[in-house]
Image: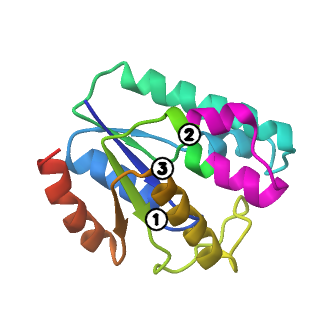
Amino acid sequence: MKKILLTGPESSGKTTLAKALAHRYNGIWVPEYARLYLEKTAGNYQEEDLLAIAQGQMALENAMSSYQPDFLFCDTGMLVMKTWSEVKYGRCHPWIEAQWNQSRYDLYLLCGIDIPWQEDPLREHPKEREYLYKHYLNALRKKKVSFLELEGSLEARLACVKPMLLNA
């Protein structure tokens, strides 16, 4: 099984791309647990909720991994949780930090912000996309993992990822 992490700022196309990749490559899409969690709270949350969301995300990823698909497309991960914590509260829970540091994926995809912002009541930072993108970029560089920066339409992104998946 190859695990692929899609990451990046809000409204950068992670979910659309993850679903399309899962469909195209007969894989499994691991949805963003935060969305499921926040839909139940009408978008209201406190700092301690981020730990519960992070733990829910990991549990969902582990549950979906048990099916042993050829590809597991993770719509989000601990980098999103770490960034969310640091940007919103100026710190990150040690458990989230540890999970990010220990996590390993076969491919990291950083979704760019060149697509239009899609309004959504659960999204918070329409004017900080560039700042957030740089935050993700720096975190991936600091982790010293190979990653692919994606831009353009869905089809352009799929075409860019295709050789990486076929060689994974």
Question: What label sits on residue 3 in the rendered view?
Answer: none
Instruction: Specify the amino acid type for callout 3.
Output: Lys
Residue position marked by numbered label 1 in the rendering: 13
Pointer 1 local density, CA inside 10 Å: few below 14, some 14–19, many at least 20: many
Question: What label sits on residue 100 in the rendered view?
Answer: 2
Measured in 3D between alpha carbons, the distance from the residue under mark 2 to the one under mark 1, in whole angstroms, is 21 Å
Location of residue 56 (image quadrant): top right
Instruction: Specify the amino acid type for callout 2.
Output: Trp
- Residue 68 within the segment the image draws in magenta: no
Left or right position of 71 against 19: left
Left or right position of 135 against 72: right
Image coordinates for residue 38, horizontal then vertical, percent:
73, 45
Q: Is residue 65 above or below residue 12?
A: above
Which residue shows up at 37% across the image and 50% down it? 19
- Residue 91 within the segment the image draws in magenta: yes
Q: Secondary structure at mark 2?
A: helix
Which residue shows up at 85% across the image and 49% down it? 44
Of 52 and 38, nearer the camera is 52
Label pair 3/2, CB-CB below 8 angstroms: yes
Q: Which residue range is magenta in the image?
A: 81-99
- Specify which label sits upstream in the sequence, 3 or 2: 2
Location of residue 72 (image quadrant): top left
Q: Is residue 35 above or below residue 132?
A: above
Label pair 3/1, CB-CB below 8 angstroms: no
- Specify which label sits upstream in the sequence, 2 or 1: 1
Location of residue 95 (image quadrant): top right
